[in-house]
Image (tube, helix red, strand yellow):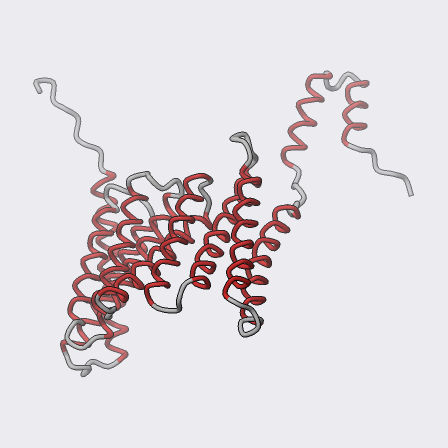
């Protein structure tokens, strides 16, 4: 079977027949190379770094848990502390100079996030087992995660910081006044609003992810008062207010994150309030209908807002 000529051979033949000039042949070859589908290259080194860091942390925790009765406090602390040092050092090595590649930056961010978890585990193992220790451990993890994110902004670093912020808030409230659905939800919701505000203010490099994570924490926190008798109305008001604020901000910040958060919050709050106000007399089908009507109203408001903001101002008169 005859071998099919390559693209280069065909172009050389066309150049020899004076159909194309050498410059034109080069342009055609570059265009064909750009249009050709590229093979999917799996970054094995990057994947291995993620798996290695995760296995180091999980392995250390499992080792300490399996040997908890046989090991003393120093041995447990040494293993978890050494794990934290290894992960943070590996993250610093991966970060390297400022001219690092994007892959090395992602690896460094993931290792710093895992290192923050290892720091929290180390403090939890070293100190007495109580609520204060949990708050201190999560606070140390939060500081480590934030420091790592400031050094190398990454998705794992941002998510770890948001998670540690919520955990630190809950445990700190529990250690001081005792956590309840109301104060715990307000604390987590306020922390989420802080993250969202930092993202809106362009302080957080991963703006959309930070906005989404902050609003998710806010919705989750503001829903918690539902679990306490007599404070359900707080959940309705806060969730509905958050949804309206998100939809209002869409006019200034045109992003789907605000739109989704606003729709979710309003759709949650309205049926919940109707259910509570009617004493549960409204059936599930009517609640679904109410949620659908709310979505339609929000959709119409969004289209109207888009039409209003997209309308060009009338031209100024010659005398103005």
* Quadrant in the rendering for residue 284: bottom left
Horizontal arrangement in the rendering, residue 80 relative to residue 230 (left or right): right
147 w.r.t. 171: above or below = above
Query: Which image quadrant for residue 290?
Result: bottom left
Which residue corresponds to the image point at 14% horizontal and 24% vertical from the top-left?
A: 316
Image quarter (top left, top right, bottom left or bottom right) of the N terminus: top right
Q: Quadrant of residue 217?
A: bottom left
Q: Residue at x 52, y 62 (%)?
A: 74
Q: Residue 207 at what x, y percent from top left?
A: 37, 43
Nearest the camera: 6 or 48?
48
| Residue 92, horizontal then vertical, whole percent | 53, 41
In the image, farthest residue toward the left: 319
- Give the number of callouts: 0
Q: Nearer the viewer, residue 127 or 319?
A: 127
Q: Quadrant of the C terminus?
A: top left
The residue most toward the right is: 1
Q: Which residue is at a point 55% across and 54% down the rendered structure image? A: 82
How far across and how far down the image is residue 98, in percent? 51, 30
Left or right of 241, for residue 205? right
Q: Camera-side residue: 191 or 289?
A: 191
Q: Nearer the viewer, residue 270 or 127?
A: 127
Identify the residue at image location x=56%, y=57%: 54
Q: Is residue 94 above or below residue 114?
A: above
Residue 248 vertical position relative to residue 34 in the rendered view, above or below: below
Above or below, 227 against 202 in this view is: below
Q: Position of residue 206 (x, y in %)?
A: 40, 43
Asked whether, in this view, residue 320 is left or right of residue 121, the answer is left
């Amino acid at each position: 079977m005859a071998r099919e000529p390559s693209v280069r051979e065909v172009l050389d033949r066309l150049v020899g027949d004076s159909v194309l000039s050498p410059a034109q042949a080069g342009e055609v070859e570059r265009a064909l190379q750009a249009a050709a589908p590229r093979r999917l290259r799996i970054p094995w080194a990057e994947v291995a770094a993620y798996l290695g860091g995760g296995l180091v942390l999980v392995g250390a925790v499992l080792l300490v848990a399996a040997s908890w009765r046989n090991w003393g406090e120093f041995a447990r602390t040494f293993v978890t502390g050494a794990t934290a040092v290894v992960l943070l050092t590996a993250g610093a090595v991966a970060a390297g100079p400022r001219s690092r590649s994007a892959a090395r930056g992602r690896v460094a961010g993931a290792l710093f996030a895992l290192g923050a978890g290892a720091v929290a585990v180390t403090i939890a193992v070293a100190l007495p087992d109580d609520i204060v220790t949990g708050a201190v451990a999560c606070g140390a993890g939060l500081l480590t995660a934030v420091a790592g994110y400031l050094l190398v902004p990454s998705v794992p670093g941002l998510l770890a910081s948001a998670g540690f912020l919520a955990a630190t808030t809950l445990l700190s409230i529990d250690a001081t006044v005792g956590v309840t659905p109301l104060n715990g939800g307000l604390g987590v919701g306020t922390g989420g609003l802080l993250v969202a505000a930092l993202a809106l203010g362009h302080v957080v490099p991963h703006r959309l992810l930070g906005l989404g994570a902050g609003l998710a924490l806010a919705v989750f926190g503001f829903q918690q008062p539902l679990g306490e008798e007599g404070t359900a109305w707080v959940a309705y008001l806060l969730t509905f207010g958050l949804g309206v604020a998100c939809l209002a901000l869409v006019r200034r910040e045109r992003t789907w994150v605000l739109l989704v958060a606003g729709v979710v919050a309003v759709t949650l709050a309205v049926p919940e309030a109707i259910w509570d106000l009617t004493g549960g007399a409204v059936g599930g089908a009517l609640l679904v209908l109410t949620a659908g009507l709310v979505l339609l109203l929000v959709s119409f408001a969004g289209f109207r807002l888009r039409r209003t903001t997209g309308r060009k101002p009338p031209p100024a008169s010659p005398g103005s």
